[in-house]
Image (cartoon, rainbow, N blue to C red):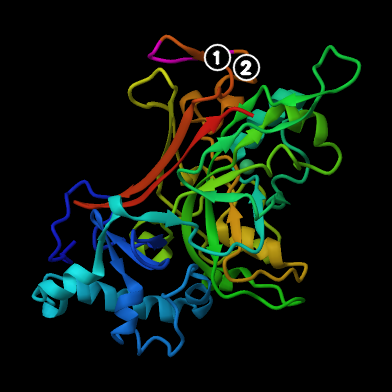
């Protein structure tokens, strides 16, 4: 990659000039605002906006805000223009910031000195179930390998509507939920803290421009409505889920907390890592058929650190390409009935499991419902998450001499 910044960026940094993910942050002394990550720094977009750098993009105030919703609503031509402006300003060839120490001191913040917040006001949140291996593993546990997949699974991207109010930014502690469960050998349910708390390794994408009620988005236009992608941990209480989920699906087992990473990586940054979507086992119905459907090569990993461990241990490695349904198919399906999506809505992948035991995306699968507990390097074992455990999920795309990273989403379990 020829593009170089005047900023000193470590070769293994997740935030080179080719990435420029957007986030919302609060400096120690100042209002919450938008920025992009560059190396270990954040470029303050609200200040650049004040100085008139985005006049060609829009006359609206977009970055002196505690959410990216207005920017997300502008659409791809504006996002591309903004990215061009930022890459030019950060380029080693441009003097504007490079040669102005006083301005640099004002527009850059150290990431270590700010508080990251949710990138958007999330109006609605949907969680898909789009990894074949996850659906197959869970189905095998519930119904056996012959009936692992429900008859609809290869015809449509299955999903449920989640809850937006309990989505939190990385670093937020996760309080073990209480609720109703029924032990298998008991005649009636009991109330108390969940005993089988789990994580789910996922990604999620933010909706840019929405669609109006009654007007589906065709699959070939789906990409125009996708702003960017974050990492997600869909914390799940399996014992609550087992007892409550029939017949309407997940409810209190899922809506007590969902964590996302603070930096939204744009589709522009992911472009070099675009891959064709593999042929699907059933030819999709016409509204799900894309002339050139795509996925991205994003390596994903989850780590677990118990209170006794001095460093986290990797417990699974998987890839975004393990998703059977594409994000364009998810979006087209979500709107095919006329459902209106809005800027800042979040559409998640579902647990991303790969074909091997080492690439399973949640404890339910990794321990096969507790039958094969994880043996940790500390000598501890885990069937499920315990209080004091921290789960962190990371992801990146490896380019030639650079890396497009997602940062991290982490959360520590605290007692009920
Ligand atoms: Mn999920």
| Residue located farthest toward the front when viewing the structure as drawn | 29
Quick one: SS at disc 2? loop
Other-residue count near label 2 (Cα within 10 Å), few / some / many at <14 / 14–19 / ≥20: some
Left or right: where 409 falls relative to 333: left
Residue at which label 1 appears: 373
- Front residue of 183/49: it is 49
Left or right: where 26 falls relative to 168: left
Left or right: where 130 falls relative to 271: right
Q: Which mark is residue 370?
A: 2
Left or right: where 146 falls relative to 321: right
| Occupied quadrant, residue 96 | bottom left
Other-residue count near label 1 (Cα within 10 Å), few / some / many at <14 / 14–19 / ≥20: some
Q: Is residue 286 visible?
A: no
What segment carries the magenta color?
Answer: 372-378
Which residue corresponds to the image point at 63% horizontal and 50% vertical from the top-left? Answer: 166
Q: CA distance from mark 2 to mark 1?
A: 6 Å
Q: Is residue 37 visible?
A: yes
In the rendered image of this protein, does residue 35 appear above or below residue 379?
A: below
**In this figure, what is the number of numbered marks?**
2
Name the main secondary structure of what is drawn in magenta. loop
Q: Quadrant of the C terminus?
A: top right
In the rendered image of this protein, does residue 21 appear above or below residue 162?
A: below
- Front residue of 324/261: it is 261
- Front residue of 310/28: it is 28
In the rendered image of this protein, does residue 120 appear above or below residue 306?
A: below
The image shows residue 285 at horizontal and vertical percentages of 71, 60
Q: Given contact means CB atoms under 8 Å apart, are the residues at marks 2 and 1 in contact?
A: yes
């Amino acid at each position: 990659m020829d593009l170089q910044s005047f900023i000193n960026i470590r070769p293994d940094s997740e935030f080179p000039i080719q990435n420029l993910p957007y986030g919302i942050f609060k400096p120690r002394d100042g209002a919450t605002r938008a920025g992009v990550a560059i190396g270990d720094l954040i470029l303050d977009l609200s200040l650049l906006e004040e100085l008139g750098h985005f006049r060609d993009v829009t006359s609206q105030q977009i970055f002196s805000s505690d959410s990216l919703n207005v920017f997300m609503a502008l659409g791809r031509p504006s996002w591309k223009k903004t990215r061009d402006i930022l890459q030019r300003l950060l380029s080693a060839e441009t003097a504007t910031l490079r040669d102005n120490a006083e301005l640099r001191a004002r527009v850059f913040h150290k990431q270590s000195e700010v508080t990251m917040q949710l990138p958007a006001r999330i109006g609605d949140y949907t969680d898909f179930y789009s990894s074949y291996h996850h659906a197959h593993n869970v189905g095998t546990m519930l119904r056996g390998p012959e009936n692992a997949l429900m008859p609809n699974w290869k015809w449509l991207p299955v999903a449920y509507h989640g809850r937006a109010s309990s989505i939190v930014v990385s670093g937020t502690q996760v309080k073990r939920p209480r609720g109703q469960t029924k032990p298998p050998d008991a005649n009636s349910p009991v109330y108390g803290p969940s005993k089988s708390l789990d994580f789910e390794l996922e990604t999620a994408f933010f909706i840019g421009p929405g669609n109006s009620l009654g007007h589906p988005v065709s699959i070939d236009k789906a990409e125009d409505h996708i702003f960017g992608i974050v990492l997600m941990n869909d914390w799940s209480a399996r014992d609550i889920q087992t007892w409550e989920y029939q017949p309407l699906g997940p409810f209190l087992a899922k809506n007590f907390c969902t964590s996302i990473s603070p930096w939204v990586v744009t589709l522009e940054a992911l472009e070099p890592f675009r891959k064709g979507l593999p042929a699907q086992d059933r030819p999709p119905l016409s509204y799900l058929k894309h002339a050139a459907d795509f996925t991205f090569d994003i390596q994903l990993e989850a780590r677990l650190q118990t209170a006794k461990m001095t460093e986290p241990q990797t417990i699974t490695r998987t890839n975004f390409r393990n998703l059977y349904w594409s994000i364009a198919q998810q979006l087209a399906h979500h709107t095919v009935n006329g459902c209106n999506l809005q800027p800042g809505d979040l559409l998640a992948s579902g647990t991303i499991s790969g074909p091997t035991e080492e690439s399973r995306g949640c404890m339910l699968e990794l321990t096969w419902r507790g039958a094969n507990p994880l043996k940790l390097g500390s000598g501890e074992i885990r069937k499920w998450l315990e209080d004091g455990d921290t789960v962190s999920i990371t992801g990146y795309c490896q380019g030639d001499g650079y890396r497009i990273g997602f940062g991290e989403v982490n959360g520590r379990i605290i007692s009920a």
